[in-house]
Image (tube, coloured by chain):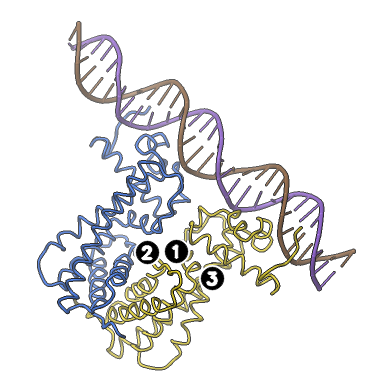
Chain colours: A yellow, B blue, C purple, D brown
Amino acid sequence: MSGARSAADHAGPDARRRAILDAAARRFAVAGVELTSIDDIARSLGATKGKIYHHFGSKGELVRAIRLHSVQLTHDHVLPAYRGGGDPATRLHRMAAAHVEVMMQALAYHRVVVETMRAHPHRGATQVERSLAAQTRALQGTYEDLFRDVIREGIESGVFAGQNLSIALHSLMMLLNAPVYWYRPRLGERGTDRDAIKTQIAAMALGALRAAPGD
Amino acid sequence: MSGARSAADHAGPDARRRAILDAAARRFAVAGVELTSIDDIARSLGATKGKIYHHFGSKGELVRAIRLHSVQLTHDHVLPAYRGGGDPATRLHRMAAAHVEVMMQALAYHRVVVETMRAHPHRGATQVERSLAAQTRALQGTYEDLFRDVIREGIESGVFAGQNLSIALHSLMMLLNAPVYWYRPRLGERGTDRDAIKTQIAAMALGALRAAPGD
DNA sequence: AATTGACACCATACCCGCTAGTATGCTTTC
DNA sequence: GAAAGCATACTAGCGGGTATGGTGTCAATT
């Protein structure tokens, strides 16, 4: 009685992988990674374990794939603002707004990221898992470099306070990730809430960097 | 061969509870809550499950107790700065510095808090667990109200930007919690690093609140 | 001071549910 | 007809929790 490809399945295997990832991210986001069983995810797909384990090798691989996708989404969404011209303050404001925006768009994915943030090396990770983790780390690194660049430029040009770059970057990222923790889209919301949030947080980010270092 | 009370045990049962909590927090912080078994914690104490389950009803109770202790520590450490006089900016700066300070002092406890932040209700929580969680929520609420008060006061007096209070508070808390994610005490550090961190973050927090709302 | 219970304290050994992962075979597709 | 795609049924092991018994401590009693 199976085999009847329906809905999003017609677009090929990658689309099916994606559908599984979406479902997994949603379940992980609401119930937590550890408390979500593979059967839960399969059930939310109207399928069984077999489907998931056909496309992914393990639960850990699922989590790593979600993490990687999250970072890719974020990087792709913020890069234009980085490449766009303007003084450091303007660029950083646009980047910050874009970051907050994508946090709220793909909320489930980013929730998984922050939950699994303090990468407990997950003893016994497979080869694929390690590879995904490595890609994620690398992309995350180049992503943070975008902000590091702009901050440094801003410090050198005097618009940002001359403080410790590493601390500033870490703090900025946490500030921009904040909505992942508390934002809950309201039913029937049309985007004005999101605009307010991203505008305010971007403004706060700029203010934080402009702060005088001494006190 | 047992029964020989040693080390910190002489100070009574509460001290033993505390020792267990410390060990649990440390293990949880380094390996993650889910990946840490009760046996792991017991081993790190030079004891067995029996000791832990004599003092705590369940693993969940352990986690909740750690969370509560974390909030209590933070509240107690920041309250003096709240009560101290000064204009809103000064008070908030002191409160922020105190918050960051206690984050780095009781790092393990706060790590557990942020890891279990998005409270997955943990289906089947016992009565004691629910009670601990309720106390934690309550205290967390009154703690955040300290900051809310000062922010509101600052907005009214014009030193802070007139932005959405809820978003500002959430963002501020995340900014102040940031060190929990990345700070690692260096061997033989004598406190100058911590001073630099808390000073810079407090300054950034002030700057974030002073930011102009519109853009 | 010595004895005796009573209870706090903890070790040992055991159970058992839960879920990640696998083995297998039936469909559908190409 | 070969291979991808997936359902079904099963296994295995980890770890949370418990049942039980032993050991020390302390207070009351004699």
Chain identity of mark 1: A
The Cα atoms of the two marked residues, 3 and 1, are separated by 12 Å
Residue appearing at x 38%, y 27% in the figure: B1
Helix or strand or loop: what does disc 2 sit on?
Answer: helix
Image mark for residue A68:
3
Residue placed under numbered mark 2 in the picture: B181
- Asked where in the image residue A6 lies, by quadrant, the reply is bottom right
Residue D4 at x, y percent in the picture: 75, 67
Location of residue A86 with respect to B13 vertically, above or below: below
Image mark for residue A117:
1
**Mark 3 crowd level (few <14, some 14–19, many ≥20, 10 Å Cα):** many
| Callout 3 and callout 1 share a chain | yes
CB-based contact (under 8 Å), mark 2 and mark 3: no
Q: How many marks?
A: 3
Nearer to the camera, A123 or B159: B159
CB-based contact (under 8 Å), mark 2 and mark 1: yes
Helix or strand or loop: what does disc 1 sit on?
Answer: loop
Residue A85 at x, y percent in the picture: 41, 93
The Cα atoms of the two marked residues, 2 and 3, are separated by 20 Å
Single out the residue that lies furthest toward the front. Answer: A188
Q: Amino acid at mark 1?
A: Met
- Asked where in the image residue B91 lies, by quadrant, the reply is bottom left
Residue appearing at x 59%, y 66% in the figure: A21
Single out the residue that lies furthest toward the left. Answer: B85
Nearer to the camera, B68 or B35: B68
Residue C15 at x, y percent in the picture: 55, 31
Image mark for residue A82:
none
